[in-house]
Image: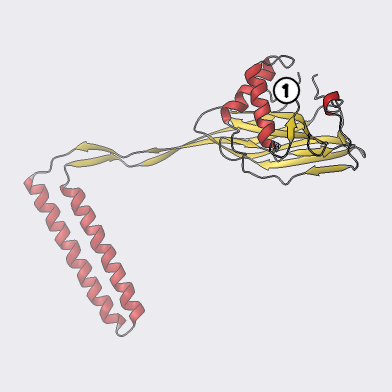
Amino acid sequence: MRTLNLSRAVIASAALAVSATALTATTATAATPSGITRESVLTAAAGYRANPDNPGGPAIKAVRSILHRGCAVDIDGGELLDTTVEAIPAKAGGSADGLVAYGQIFNIVDESQRDCVVAVVASTLPDFTLSGTSTVSVQTDPGNKTVSVTTPLTGDVTVSAPITVVPPATFTGGFPAFSATGAITKTTNVPAVKVKDKKTTSEKKAAKKKYDKRIKAAKKSYKKALAKAKSSKSKKAAAKKAYVAKRATAKAKYSYAIAGYRIVKKATTSTDSRPFALSLELL
């Protein structure tokens, strides 16, 4: 079983002096940091799943991009992401994919360090959006505490809020817990289907007759409603609103009746929903 090396020693060139213990887990948010794409998540997960010890340049680059944005590495403020990053992918297959990524971040200005873990989930299919939740948990010392972050899934890719520790606090070595459940969904608008249908003169006359009858009935109903309303402004307004609606309906029906086409299938929406349940791959 492959585990994240969460207690790796700080590289000599960035030896840091930190005076206080700190542990933070930022509030989960559904907003994915700009720059983390569905493609980068799929590339990273596939690379680390195929060869965790040598995932390849594209996969490593994708994980570094995820950590840079997910952990909000402040380059202008002097922060640098360690050259070595680690990731554990979710099990292959299904309508979603994801991974847990870990990196150490050093600040060369104030000589501080923080270690960061994020989880990211993406749809395996284009134009589908995520729903559901993801949860990532890690153990920390001192105190052997469990820190968890649950994040609602939205869009085609969602990154969790980062879990960050500042030395002398550390992530304990071992396997982080991760799960994500939900579905990916795609809604497609299906337009109405029309066919040519040229109307005869008699059909048009019949349609006009029906139209005149509907308008006459609407006017008669409106007149009666006004009489009942008497001096009530609200009742008069309601009567006029009803009349306008009936008149518009009559016009719409007449226009369709004399049109050079007929609708054989109404416009609809088609929804494709595919559930998923993710857990980490035991590498």
43 horizontally vs 5: left or right: left
Q: Residue at x 22, y 67 (%)?
A: 218
Q: Nearer the viewer, residue 6 or 3?
A: 6
Residue 100: quarter of image: top right
241 horizontally vs 220: left or right: right
Local packing at callout 1 (Cα closer than 10 Å; few below 14, some 14-19, many 20+) is some
Residue 214: quarter of image: bottom left
Residue 195 to residue 84: above or below = below
Query: Is residue 224 visible from the viewing direction of this image?
Result: yes
Residue 58 spot, x, y in % from top left: 62, 19
In the rendered view, how is the structure colored?
secondary structure
Q: Going by the picture, which residue comes out furthest to the bottom?
A: 231
Residue 128 spot, x, y in % from top left: 52, 34
Query: Is residue 94 visible from the viewing direction of this image?
Result: no
Q: Residue at x 22, y 53 (%)?
A: 253
Q: Residue at x 86, y 28 (%)?
A: 7
Image quadrant in which the C terminus is located:
top right
Q: Nearer the viewer, residue 167 or 221?
A: 167
Residue 144 spot, x, y in % from top left: 90, 37
Image quadrant in which the N terminus is located:
top right
Give SS at disc 1.
loop
244 horizontally vs 1: left or right: left
Q: Residue at x 34, y 77 (%)?
A: 235
Residue 172 spot, x, y in % from top left: 87, 31
Residue 81 to residue 24: above or below = above
> Which residue is identified by label 1?
281
